[in-house]
Amino acid sequence: MQNGFTMPADEVRQRKGGGRKKSKKGKGKGQGGSANERSSSLDGQDEVPLLPPIVPPKKPVEEKKRTVQAKTEEESSMAICLQVLFPYLLAGMGMVMAGMVLDSVQHWDVFKVITEVFILVPALVGLKGNLEMTLASRLSTAANTGQMDDPKQQWLMVCSNLALIQVQATVVGFLAALAAVALGAVSRGGVELDQAAVLCASSVTTAFIAALSLGLVMIGVIIGSRKVGINPDNVATPIAASLGDLITLSLLAGVSSTLFNYRDIWYLSPLVCMFFLVLIPLWVVIARRSLQIREVLRSGWQPVIVAMSISSFGGLILDKTVSDPNFEGMAVFTPVINGVGGNLVAIQASRISTYLHFWSIPGVLPYKMRQHWPNPCVTFFSAGVNSKSARVLFLLVVPGHMVFLFAIKMLQGGHTAITLAFTCCYLCAALLQVGILLYVADLIVRLMWRKGLDPDNFSIPYLTALGDLLGTGFLALCFRLVMLVEGLGL
């Protein structure tokens, strides 16, 4: 009986002793065991406290990124069209009003005496593409990739970007005036210093004020569209275009006319010009606070200056045609055809750039865009989202221009009758211009990305400047062709 009762007690003691031994053994191992055992125990201990602080902050950002990527990939043609349509029509009406302004002011004294002002028109209006649309594309990409979700980061990006475009606007405005003076001197055979001073002061003042006002509007549009769930790529650049042409042309006409009236005060124009040039170091200091903008400040000048040069040649065409009776009325259509082409190609370039930022790293094209030099069929007829948007934007050309031509006719702008022959030639010119621009956009954005350059900063200036040159050239050919058709009595 005792043996029967003691056995369980012994078992209990043995089990307890065994448990204690094991625990001691475990302690011994924990203190002086192998490195592997220590590391495994440490891993086991560290996993519990480290998981809560690390994982929760990352999950929402990753989920948000995946959601945005999925939305971008699944965007239908109808969704793209509906998002683009209203800003596109709004931009077009802004361009129509800009055309009406140019058609009216071309008869002012300053435009008759200093005809080089016409050379400034595409270059300064092109700043919208060089600066504001580049700003819109850069901030749209930042907003879509979540870089502006943090308020501190958002404020830094806003201030740095505004300072950057003030630097660029002042410098490019001054260089555009020098280019206009040089091109005018070649055709005239000389330079008049008082007129050159008026040109420089007018150009720098217009560029500075237009860049500041449009930059503020762009920032508001991008932050607002992001909050209401609209893709900023689809709306920011058209709104920049709608206000850019009208504001720039109105400022150029007003400032140049005022300075021209006070040209007897010889020091006024040089003083105004120097005031804006002296502010450049201040904007540089503010812009350099952002590492990204610091890089643009260092390497982002080539596209802006080359684009300004290309636009100036478009301005030379405009200068030579507006004074010719056979091309009378061209002034009202120039901002419209140039603006629509630049507007549509800026949307496409911004969308492709956002796509590349999502799916690849600079220097490497993603699998779906692996071709370095795609043919036009790939650009317009493949299954990708970028090809889809190219088709939508190309198909918007004819209905958009029909609305704008009707608006010009109703407002009785220009001195050209909008006949069937003119409408057909004009629409063919617009389709050819936009088709070339959308294809070139695909090539340039891929090229920039392969070279490790950000397409947001480098592609849009070239594309909008090419749009100005093609638009002005094709419009002049359109007027010439209509004149020949009417001469044949067709």
Image (cartoon, rainbow, N blue to C red):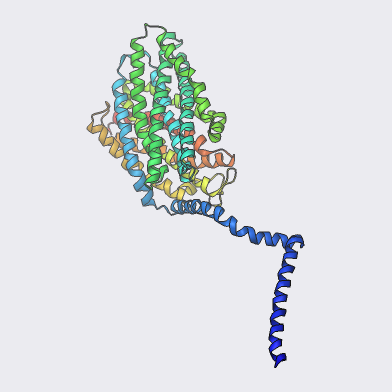
Q: Is residue 112 left or right of residue 22?
A: left
- Residue 267: tell me if it is visible: yes
Residue 357 on image: x %, y %: 52, 45
Q: Farthest bottom residue?
A: 1
Residue 416 on image: x %, y %: 27, 28
Within the image, what quadrant is residue 42 found in? bottom right
- Residue 382: tell me if it is visible: no
Name the image quarter holding the N terminus: bottom right
Q: Is residue 301 left or right of residue 93?
A: right
Q: Total number of numbered labels? A: 0
Towards the viewer: 235 or 279: 279
Name the image quarter holding the C terminus: top left
Residue 249 on image: x %, y %: 35, 25
Q: Is residue 405 left or right of residue 198?
A: left
Towards the viewer: 268 or 79: 268
Towards the viewer: 18 or 289: 18
Residue 311 on image: x %, y %: 45, 27
Within the image, what quadrant is residue 225 found in? top left
Towards the viewer: 122 or 82: 82
What's the residue at 75%, 65% (across, down)? 28
What's the residue at 39%, 45% (across, down)? 227
What's the residue at 52%, 25% (across, down)? 284
Within the image, what quadrant is residue 234 found in? top left
